[in-house]
Amino acid sequence: MEYEFRRNTLTGTFQASFSMDHEVLGLWFSEELADNRAGYIEISQAIVQLQKSHLKSWRYVGKGLTLELDSEQARVFANALEMQETQQLDESMSFYDAESEAFCGLEDFEVALQSWRKFLDESS
């Protein structure tokens, strides 16, 4: 999983771009987490609790995307996907969700999260 962080000097916003199949992670970092230090701390603490087996799973629900963690992986998905899961489709049809959902290992996610925080701290 490759990623790059940038700062838009015109707007002062921060942007994360992730490799193919992980694009939604970039959207989550850029729009849901952004420079929310309290959110970063909350997520970091949840990761520690998961690694110590004090939690089985954990969720961070945002405006448009949700982060779901367990002891092995991180999943980011569009909140609309949960509504789709309850809808029934004909067997020959399916929802296109490749750009609305991504998975990665918990350790990889933790490294990306720490890199994002470091980037924000250095860019401020």
Image: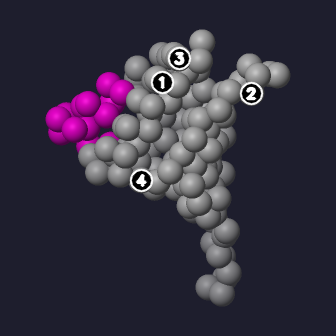
Residue 117, disc:
1
Callout 4 touching callout 3 (CB < 8 Å): no
Q: CA distance from mark 3 to mark 2?
A: 14 Å
Q: Position of residue 47 (x, y in %)?
A: 31, 34
Provide the residue span drawn in magenta.
Answer: 44-59
The residue wearing badge 3 is: 122
Residue 104, disc:
4
Residue 8, disc:
2
Question: Which comes before the other along the chain, label 2 or label 1?
Answer: 2
Callout 3 touching callout 2 (CB < 8 Å): no
Q: Residue furthest bottom?
A: 92
- Residue at disc 1, secondary structure: helix
Q: Position of residue 71 (x, y in %)?
A: 27, 46
Callout 3 touching callout 1 (CB < 8 Å): no
Query: Which amino acid, mark 1?
Result: Arg
Query: Which amino acid, mark 2?
Result: Asn
Point 62% across, 85% down: residue: 91
Q: CA distance from mark 3 to mark 1?
A: 9 Å
- Residue at disc 2, secondary structure: loop
